[in-house]
Image (cartoon, rainbow, N blue to C red):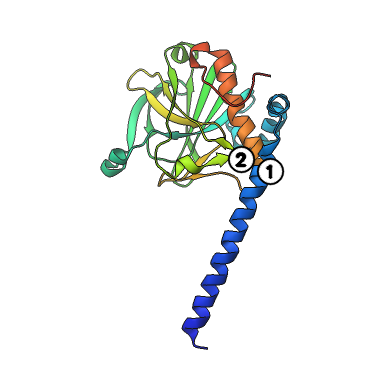
Amino acid sequence: MSTIIYVVIFFVVFYAVAIFWWRSQRNKSKNAFANLDLSREARSAPQYQEELMNGDYAFLKKQMNTAPIDAFTTAASEYSATDRAKDLGKDALKSLATLGTVKFTTVTTPKYLALSGDELHLFDTNKDGDIDKHLVFDRQRLQQSAISEIPLSGSSWKHIKYGDYALRSYKLELHTDQQPVHLILYSGLVNVSPNNAAFLSMNANKQVQEFVVGNYFLNKLGERYPHLKVPSYLPVA
């Protein structure tokens, strides 16, 4: 056989294996969520959260030092096609953490929110994935903030599901001295790439944990600030 035929065969086999693996992972995810007892999962949320913070999200504990984390989630900037075309880089706002003017990156680098007591901590990352900004919103600012459930943007996002639970998205508007910070939250811990693509964990059990922890954050935020309450999949434990 010629080299071209070998190459074609390789790619056909590779594609077939990839499709088989993807379908297998999707079926495992559907099975994991099929008989999910949401009330029991709500009670397990603190345990899941602790496990994640001792693993992939251990950096949040480090950033918070000794301050407790009551709930946490991932977030993304509200960054439209127009924003990307113009390549808007940064917005100035007041940082309660430093009491100085900092730059908040609006590009779609990963962002994290941690609820600690009455404060909401926002961690912004640079293009290398390292946290380079830590902003703190106190009760006064959060009382002037707002949140609402919004439709998912982009056709590809509408196909993202936790089993049969469709992904929900929320727009959080955090009050600052200048322009508000707009963030997009989801009903789970979702990683958003710079080209606005979403990624869920491939491990089905981990997907359950991230689904529960993401909804747990929404519930906790709503408990602490009733005007920031939105529908979630998880009942209040």
Q: Is residue 148 above or below residue 109?
A: above
Residue kind at label 1, given as amino acid type: Asn
Residue at x 59%, y 55% (from the top left corner):
22
Residue 42, x across and y down, in percent: 68, 25
Residue 56, x across and y down, in percent: 63, 41
Residue 153, x across and y down, in percent: 40, 37
Q: Is residue 34 left or right of residue 101?
A: right
Residue kind at label 2, given as amino acid type: Gly
Given the current orientation, which residue lies at the most extreme bottom position? 1
Residue 224, x across and y down, in percent: 57, 13
Residue ID for mark 1: 31
Secondary-structure class at tag 1 = helix
Q: In which quadrant will I find the C terminus? A: top right
Q: For residue 67, say whether it is visible.
A: no
Q: For residue 151, say whether it is visible.
A: yes
User: In terms of sequence position, does the residue under pointer 1 or pointer 2 come before the other?
Assistant: 1
Measured Cα–Cα span from mark 1 to mark 2: 7 Å
Residue at x 66%, y 36% (from the top left corner):
209
Secondary-structure class at tag 2 = loop
Residue ID for mark 2: 163
